[in-house]
Amino acid sequence: MSIYATLWKLKFPKDGDDYPGCEWVTVTAQSVASHIGSPTPGGGYEHSDPFAAFLPPPVRTNDDGESGHLRAVVFVTEKTRKGTDRSPQEYVDPLLVVAGETYANMLFGALHACICDALRGDKPRAIVTSILSDGRAQVFFDDGTSKEIPR
């Protein structure tokens, strides 16, 4: 049984920046319910949390296993596969992992920026796109490089 439930799937620029001709990937937000790993008495995790190595700290819940927010939200791409040697519930290479309370209080613009930064990785950020008179585009990056996009 999975500890994850899909919240949503959205398309994002593959390299974190939207410009003419960029590739797109699907990012999936996977939620982890508040009762997963919770130390609340009666939940089964009072003495250990098997997910502590790859999730934010557990959340205290009420007697029904409920809390005001999720334990975590894990963002993955379609190429991410599940299952590590440590745990079959751990994503091998999640894009981003945030605590449930952080996710609940985050504006979408800030979340979008975090996801795009994670997709970009150590690649330079696109800062300007110029559309040339013949219809081609040129993208300029913050490290001084540029890339021509054919029509």
Image (cartoon, rainbow, N blue to C red):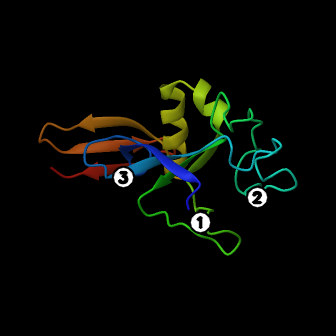
Query: Which residue occupies 63% across, 71% down?
Result: 84
Which residue carries the number 2 mark? 53
Mark seen at residue 43: none
Q: Nearer the viewer, residue 89 or 141?
A: 89
Which residue carries the number 3 mark? 25
Q: Amino acid at mark 3?
A: Val
Q: Residues within 10 Å of mark 2 (few under 14, many from 20)?
A: few
Query: What secondary structure is marked by label 2?
Result: loop
Q: CA distance from mark 3 to mark 1?
A: 18 Å
Query: Which residue occupies 74% across, 35% down?
Result: 63
Q: Nearer the viewer, residue 127 or 112?
A: 112
Q: Amino acid at mark 2?
A: Ala
105 horizontally vs 126: left or right = right
Query: What secondary structure is marked by label 3?
Result: strand
Q: Amino acid at mark 1?
A: Val
Q: Give the percent coordinates (x, y) of residue 20.
A: 26, 43
